[in-house]
Image (cartoon, rainbow, N blue to C red):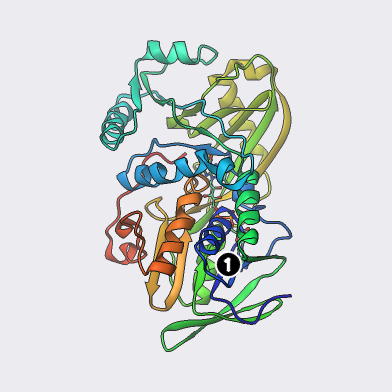
Amino acid sequence: MLPTTADVVIIGGGVMGVSTAYHLATRGCRNVVLLERAPFLGSEATGKCAGGIRYQFSTEINVKLSLLSLPLLARFEEELGQNIDLRWPGYLFLLDNQADLATFRGNVAMQNRLGVPSQLLSPGQVTRLVPLLYLDDIVGGAYHAGDGLADPGGVVQGYASGARRAGAQLFTGVTATEIHVQGGRVVGVTTSDGTIATPAVVDAAGPWAGQVAALADVDLPLVPLRRQIVVTTLTGVPSDFPFVIDFSRSLYFHREGQGILTGQSNPDEKPGFDQSVNRAWTELHLEQAMMRFPLMERAGLLREWAGLYEVTPDAHPVIDGLSDPAGFYVVAGFSGHGFMHGPIAGQLIAEMILDGRANSLDLHPLRLSRFAEGDLVREHNVV
Ligand SMILES: Cc1cc2nc3c(=O)[nH]c(=O)nc-3n(C[C@H](O)[C@H](O)[C@H](O)COP(=O)(O)OP(=O)(O)OC[C@H]3O[C@@H](n4cnc5c(N)ncnc54)[C@H](O)[C@@H]3O)c2cc1C
């Protein structure tokens, strides 16, 4: 039964919500309530994602989020007793033009300065790493052996179980429908199952975070954008095949079981909540995939699905505690790479709520007011 009061109500049961619940509860926050409207936790963007985890970003703030978040995934099983199928095959960006090569040279220098040993590869080095790919047009690559993959379902399960063990209450099949504000402060949430009085609400609603923010009269510029994935059966792919991103085509591959998982972002996709598979796009995507990875002509189609990115104007998230209304926290807008940053994002929100500020990282670049101020720096490495 839904409680009538809570210290914190978290709206959304994807990686952001369960990580926040876990970090709040394990730090001793007594009455944490999470609401997920779907029948299962982690069944939206988190459950539909490709599972990639990387340090290779173009902005310092994203590299810093990775520097804090990926070690939490590395010790996840030890801390939470949950296997997350963690692998470190590395990430390889394939670059087919001099402009991208120059940009990635700058990115690699910045990553190295922050302590990430990524490197720029010559076409010959790229060929030695991924000889199965068509590479005649490639002018170089960016590679980091310490990037990898993890299982989103395991991460959600681990945090949800850990949060429950520490006393948090997580509800599925419950929709938040209203947020109540009095005198500039959050005072409660009305749901499909009743009203909860609370001084703190966390908007962790992923692609729907803009709608949830609007319930508190907050303008959160974030749009949902459909993205598709195809999983194929294919033999002959080496077990150490890296996560490959054909950067100018927004096309990617990684090993999934014995086969290959591939995705490609449709540049003509318009914002919207439609999650049906666009078959015409699948065909174009697979044509490009076979051009880059000729072995895929022998692949069988196993599964395909569509999910939603949660995209902000600068492709960076908002991790913020607002003053208007006070008690309203936002952890959303990760723009297609939030699974990997979910662990630290939940910890940072817990710090804001319990300590009054995020102590682990300066979150100034991720404040909500940057949009109104026009103080934006765009992330370049979005796939
Ligand atoms: C195809 C695809 C591939 C991706 N690949 C990667 C990748 O390789 N690596 C990576 O790091 N990231 C990747 N991402 C991005 C990543 O999935 C997201 O950034 C991340 O999962 C967002 O987590 P979330 O918890 O914010 O959102 P979600 O997992 O969507 O959770 C939000 C939840 O809020 C619930 N909700 C919404 N409104 C309400 C309401 N009113 N009341 C109650 N509940 C509500 C929803 O049902 C949902 O379950 C990918 C995404 C997609 C779609």
User: Is 185 displayed left or right of 86 in the figure?
Assistant: left
Q: Nearer the viewer, residue 284 or 71?
A: 71
Q: Quadrant of residue 184?
A: bottom left
Q: Secondary structure at mark 1?
A: strand
Q: Quadrant of residue 40?
A: bottom right
Above or below, 309 against 188 in this view is above
Residue at horizontal 69 percent and vertical 38 percent from the top: 304
User: Is 380 displayed left or right of 41 in the figure?
Assistant: left
Residue 136 shows in this picture = no
Q: Nearer the viewer, residue 379 or 194?
A: 194
Q: Quadrant of residue 146?
A: top left
Residue at horizontal 52 percent and vertical 16 percent from the top: 133
Residue at horizontal 64 percent and vertical 32 percent from the top: 283
Task: Residue 151 in the image: state x and y as whole percent.
Answer: 61, 40
Residue pushed farthest bottom? 183
Dot 1 alpha-carbon crowd within 10 angstroms: few under 14, some 14 to 19, many 20 or more: many
Above or below, 307 against 118 in this view is below
Q: Quadrant of the N terminus?
A: bottom right
Residue at horizontal 68 percent and vertical 23 percent from the top: 258
Report the number of numbered marks. Answer: 1
Could you tell me the amino acid type at mark 1? Ile
Task: Residue 336 in the image: state x and y as whole percent.
Answer: 50, 46
Task: Residue 45 in the image: state x and y as whole percent.
Answer: 59, 51
Disc 1 within 8 angstroms of ligand 1 (CB): yes
Above or below, 284 against 322 in this view is above
Q: Which residue does the numbered mark 1 point to in the structure image?
A: 11
